[in-house]
Image: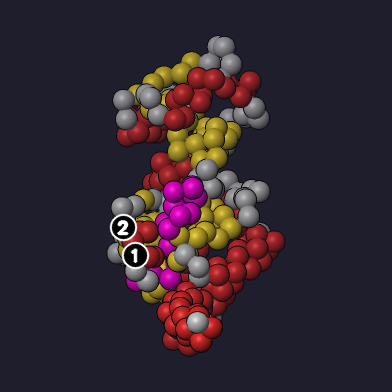
Amino acid sequence: MHRRLVLGIALAASIVLPVAAQAQSSLDDILARKAITIAIPTDFPPYGFVGTDLKPQGLDVEMAQYIAGKLGVKLELLPVTTANRIAYLQTRKAALVISTLGKNAEREKVIDFTFAYSPFFQGVFGSKSLSLKSFDDMKGKTVGVTRGAIEDMELTKLAPEGTNIRRFEDNNATIAAFVSGQVQLVATGASVAGNMMQRNPNLGAEFKLLIKDSPNFIGVAKGDDKLRTRINEIIDAARAAGDLDRLSQKWLGRPAGDLPR
């Protein structure tokens, strides 16, 4: 009986250990191959989109480039969609997913997450020439918002009496109202605002007030602790050096701020 028990444990170990070794070996494989495949969006500006030169660009793309540079390896970009990005990670077609990925309990059952690397938020945006230090300063001003959106519901709670909130039927109409000067301020999501500022630099628009924050994390295969730990080290160093703030400022019009670890 003792001999059979020992053999059973040995057999179980022979099955489990290769799986564990595979889960832990991706960083070693990346460094040996001198290349890393990172999944990024190409249809979600300003985080990831195709520029006029037909090359991917955006905050998530630059973060992927930053990580590859710190690892000292070649970057292989893998365009993904919201629907398939986690599947690419689970099947090991990508070592990392940097694609506006929010962390929640359901996703944590199937993948792991690094520290947060960038903000994803709803906020109030306006011209740099317009002073706006708090929601109280919105009194007497006109702000555009998309009807029924998260920012509409939250803004209704935060805006003081006397704020003229104009509601539009979709994001395009809301942004068009701001660009044309029909409203002084616009309340919208980071992606919509970032795209607007990239396309209309002459507006001199900037982030003013935070409505709601939901930061982005990098996705890692479940149990890939060695790679996750190394990426966390890179994110921590980037935070300390101010690189995360600079990246966020460039693409979103605000610093990354105090992101969760």
Contact (Cβ within 8 Å) of mark 2 with mark 1: yes
Amino acid at the residue labelled 1: Tyr
- Of 140 and 40, which appears nearest the observer? 40
Residue 84, numbered circle: 2
- Of 154 and 128, which appears nearest the observer? 154
* Quadrant of the rendered image containing residue 14: bottom left
Amino acid at the residue labelled 2: Asn
In the rendered image, the quadrant that contains the C terminus is bottom right
Q: Which residues are magenta?
A: 93-110
Q: CA distance from mark 2 to mark 1?
A: 6 Å
Q: Is residue 233 visible?
A: yes
Mark 2 residue crowding within 10 angstroms, few (<14) / some (14–19) / many (20+)? few
Above or below residue 261? Residue 121 is above
Residue 209 position in % (x across, y down): 58, 33
Name the residue rendered at 62%, 51% in the picture: 260
Colour theme: secondary structure
Residue 8, numbered circle: none
Name the residue rendered at 41%, 68% in the picture: 38
Residue 88, numbered circle: 1
Residue 7 position in % (x across, y down): 47, 85
